[in-house]
Image (cartoon, rainbow, N blue to C red):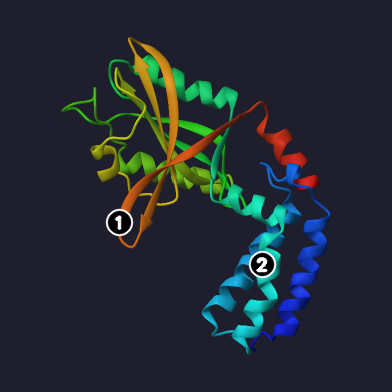
Amino acid sequence: MLLSPHDIAGDRADLQLLLNSFSEVQVQRPVPAKLGRAFRFWKATEAKVSTSGDVANAAAGKAVIHGIKSHPVLQSLTMLVESMALIISRPLFEQLRQHGEQTYPHECCGVLVGEFDELGDKTVKTVVRCGNTRTDSPHNRYHISPAELVRVQRESRLAGYDIIGFYHSHPDHPAKWSSTDLAEAHWTGCSYVITSVEKGRAVTTNSFLLLDDDQSKRFADESLELVLNIDERAAENAGN
């Protein structure tokens, strides 16, 4: 069944009422659940209009949705979505940094287990330490055995979570991804967290998002958001 301009206008009116109930200062992480769901629904409608195939009158449909794009809350939300974040509690953050200190001068490595939210942000629930199986150059390379990765994936799914990223350390080297890091990264959409460890002390930690656009794999800088308590934050978000 094709969408009509009248249908789209109704969707726009509903979204307009919802957007008007929020202020720009409320558009921050964690995004209120009902606003996140509305945004995803609207983006899906917008995509249908842009492709024209599911809309009876594409030109009229585009005219209907054009006006709402300038809504300040929607613009702020769009900007927030385009800068996805990895959310982690401070205790878990310190765990992965301490792992790098303990394995110095070799690289540590591990898996980030958690969940993806409605807008693409990732929340870390557990940090799983893994062994670095590289024996040729463990001071500047890391590798997680397939068997261990399968075990972590199975256990995370049983707990209701997913693998959302990986972490490793760079002994006496900046917390920036290398060409080897990119070549050996394969989990598109996941976070790759790197901690620089200088003379045995964790210094800087950065996160990078693995993207794959038109068969071209690349890393993008990702915001790393530290919170005191993940569960309290999630409960607060669910209530919004």
- Residue 118, visible in the rendered structure: no
How far from the left and from the top, in percent, is residue 54?
Answer: 58, 84
Residue with the most extreme left position: 136
Q: For the residue labelled by badge 1, is the local secondary structure a helix, a strand or a loop? A: strand
Q: Residue at x 32, y 35 (%)?
A: 177
The amino acid beneath tag 1 is Ser
How far from the left and from the top, in percent, is residue 220?
Answer: 41, 44
- Picture mark count: 2
Q: Residues within 10 Å of mark 2 (few under 14, many from 20)?
A: some
Q: Residue at x 78, y 76 (%)?
A: 10
Q: Is residue 128 left or right of residue 141?
A: right
How far from the left and from the top, in percent, is residue 197?
Answer: 36, 17
Question: Cβ–Cβ below 8 Å for labels 1 and 2?
Answer: no
Q: Residues within 10 Å of mark 1 (few under 14, many from 20)?
A: few
Provide the residue designation for mark 2. 42
Q: Is residue 212 above or below residue 1?
A: above
**Quadrant in which the N terminus is drawn:** bottom right
Q: For the residue labelled by badge 2, is the local secondary structure a helix, a strand or a loop? A: helix
Marks 1/2: CA distance? 29 Å
The amino acid beneath tag 2 is Trp
Provide the residue designation for mark 1. 216
How far from the left and from the top, in percent, is residue 169?
Answer: 35, 25
In depth, the one of 114 and 78 nearer the eye is 78
